[in-house]
Image: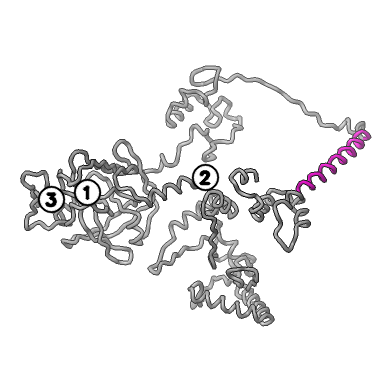
Amino acid sequence: MKALENLGHDANLWGPLMIHVISTKLDTNTLRAWEKQAPKTEVSEVKDIIEFLNNHCQLLEAVESAKRLNECGDNQKKEKKRFDYQKRTVLHATSKKFKCYLCNETTHAIYHCKKFLDLTIKERHQKVTQLSICNVCLAHHSENQLCKFSGCRKCGEAHNTLLHIPEEQSDEQIISTHVTCAEQKQVLLSTAIIKIKSHFNETFIVRALLDSGSQTNFITTELAQRLKSPRKRVNISISGVDNSKGKSFYSITTLIQSQNSNYSRQLDFLTLSKITSFLPHETINTTGIKIPNDVKLADPHYDVPGKIDVLFGAECFYSILKAGKHKVDATEIIFQETELGWIVAGSVSSLAQTTTKTFFNSIVIDNQVNLNELMSKFWQVEEMGSNIKLSIEERSCVEHFEQTVKREHTGKFIVELLLKNNVEILGDSKAMARRRFLATENNLRKNNDLRVKYVEFMDEYIKLNHMKESQSINEISYYMPHHAVLRNHSATTQTRVVFDASAPSTSGTSLNQMLMKGPVIQDELICKLKFEYSYRSCHIVFSSVKTF
């Protein structure tokens, strides 16, 4: 409450939220006492629960004082009887000098030794083996003696944290790629306009950069999403000049075609949020460049800055080259024939006087500032990060989701259910679901208002394609019972239908018991509302209907 007051907020205006936060911190007995005293027909105020806690604390202090006086009298009577059975506690204090096994100094241990900390992780492992010390506690003890240290604080394995090898260093593949730089004169890179096929055989016209200095092919994440092609999870590090680093986490496979010939090829691409800045960086002065009549350009607008959607690496670059080649007199421009058409490359002069430097990879410096990107980075910096360790079951759920999620041409996402056990464990549930349905019908006959709203709700479900009649009858299936719930105080959905996947079948097993539980990916609502209210200027809360 003091923090809210320091931020200029009135704590009393946070009544329901503050009461919820305080209630979650109370023990069971205190919470039960507050629920008995709290008003039932209206929302309590913050001052009410503060006053209750003050009175409750005074009551507990008085009870504890009286209890201690009574226990003191009883203890004096039983002191003689208890004397023979009293527990005795003996404290031992020992002192042990540290000794570094690496430099033989007695002023520090090896895990504080500067020489040891300056070694690489691989060299630390070699040194520990050479010194014959425990790789968990980094000390000498017999092999039969169990080490009391818990292990690595990062992964939980049986080794010291100083010996932990990050997963990224052991599983990654390293791919080198290109760098472009323009200083006093503009260097024109080869570009081409190509066709690329989507997962549903749609054709997109995109602009590609041909780069013989890249070991793989790249595609922008925006274009990959438009193609709707299945994505494969990867973990690949991309390195460039001066050891600049980048990351790619997905790859796709798609078909590319030439606009000027019958050439086509299936290629694998790594996805990146941005391949490079606009190429060329500035409009090219083409006054002195004469294009031969028999030259059909792969990119007719090679002289105008444009967005790069695809990058072809050395895998594809040399296979599309053809024998034709033409050099423009008195210039450094070269026209090279390829399967995609004639590409243009070389040193030219630009119409602008500014100097542009661009480095491909994680660092891009150019004179085109995107306001949306700046705002996006601003909010990303402000967001509170989370470092949540997933259990084995949660990791399995995440991997299963990434492998099976797919999107139909209608835009609907489909994910397979992840089961713990064999589905044959499920028993018959049709009779149980039928009894529950008949009971629901009896309740609806008694309440005509609920029946009308129930029918409207189910009709809306059908119109929204949230449910449809099943035509197939499988031997192994689960019938999920449901019932209607009426909430007159709700401002959005007064009547909703609750589907009960916890209803047991004849084997005693329900569908919920068969499903694996994934990680919680949403923040608690109370924390999210508090953060939004404290740090955002617009105090608005959005709600959704029929989300779950």
Front-most of residues 202 and 430: 202
**In the rendered structure, which disc, 2 or 3, sits on the residue that comes first in sequence?**
3
**Disc 1 from disc 2: Cα separation:** 41 Å
Choose mark 2 or mark 3, whichever is in front.
Answer: 3
Q: Residue flagged by tag 3: what amino acid is it?
A: Thr
| Magenta-colored span | 52-77
**Disc 2 from disc 3: Cα separation:** 54 Å
- Residue, disc 1: 280
Q: In which quarter of the view is residue 458 placed?
A: bottom right
- Residue, disc 2: 387
Q: Residue flagged by tag 1: what amino acid is it?
A: Pro
Front-most of residues 459 and 176: 459
**In the rendered structure, which disc, 1 or 2, sits on the residue that comes first in sequence?**
1
Q: Find residue 89 and report its horizontal and vertical position in percent.
A: 78, 28
Can residue 347 be seen here? The reply is yes
Secondary-structure class at tag 3: loop
Q: Find residue 220 and report its horizontal and vertical position in percent.
A: 32, 53
- Residue, disc 3: 286
| Residue 59 shown in magenta | yes
Callout 1 touching callout 3 (CB < 8 Å): no
